[in-house]
Image (tube, rainbow, N blue to C red):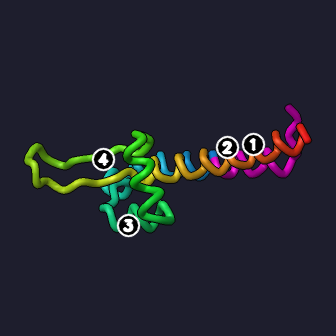
Amino acid sequence: MEIDLFKLKQLYIEAGDIAALSVLKQLYPSFDEVKYEEACQLAGSEHWLLQQIKSGAVKKIRRGKAKNSPIYYSRREIAAVRMAEITLEKYEKNKNSIIE
């Protein structure tokens, strides 16, 4: 598989974004955890987020053991899944254009 310089640059930028979020999570753990409303905004749509939660790609983080303790989602996980999905779409599109 050949990859041009622009695509490779984009992959490095996206990987750097995820790495930056990982560093922020290490330094400020509470920054990574967002409530449902903010998670929907980060995801781009509520439907997409619910789909990813159902598939297990984005996991719920419950603070506390009680049933009514708040549920949070990882900012880093949402960003990683979105970037992975975009990369796969680009790859599939490129693969299909090569075949035709």
Q: Is residue 33 visible?
A: yes
Secondary element at tag 3? helix
Q: Is residue 30 left or right of residue 26?
A: left
User: Do labels 3 and 1 touch, CB within 8 Å?
Assistant: no
Local secondary structure at mark 2: helix
Q: Secondary structure at mark 4?
A: strand
Cα separation, mark 1 vs mark 2, equals 5 Å
Within 10 Å of disc 3 (Cα), the crowding (few <14, some 14-19, many 20+) is some
The residue lying toward the viewer, choosing from 22 and 3, is 3
Lower sequence index among marks 1 and 4: 4
- Kind of residue sitting beneath label 4: Lys
Q: Residue furthest left?
A: 66
List the residue tagged with mark 3: 38
Instruction: Tell me if label 3 and label 2 are in contact, CB under 8 Å.
Output: no
In the rendered structure, which segment of residues is drawn in magenta?
1-14
In front: label 3 or label 1: 1
Marks 1 and 4, how far apart at CA:
29 Å
Residue 73 image offset from top left, x and y in percent = 34, 52
Residue 56 placement (x, y as % from top left): 40, 39
Dot 4 crowding, Cα within 10 Å, few <14, some 14–19, many 20+: some
Q: Is residue 62 magenta?
A: no
Residues at discs 2 and 4 in contact (Cβ within 8 Å): no
Amino acid type of the residue that numbered disc 1 sits on in the rendered structure: Tyr
Is 3 part of what is drawn in magenta? yes
According to the image, label 1 marks what residue? Answer: 91
Please, which residue is most extreme toward the top here?
A: 1
Give the vertical position of 12 relative to 36 (above or below): above
Label 3 and label 4: CA atoms lie apart by 14 Å
Residue ID for mark 4: 60
Q: Which residue is mark 2?
A: 88
Which residue is drawn at the image coordinates 30% and 61% (left, top)?
Answer: 35
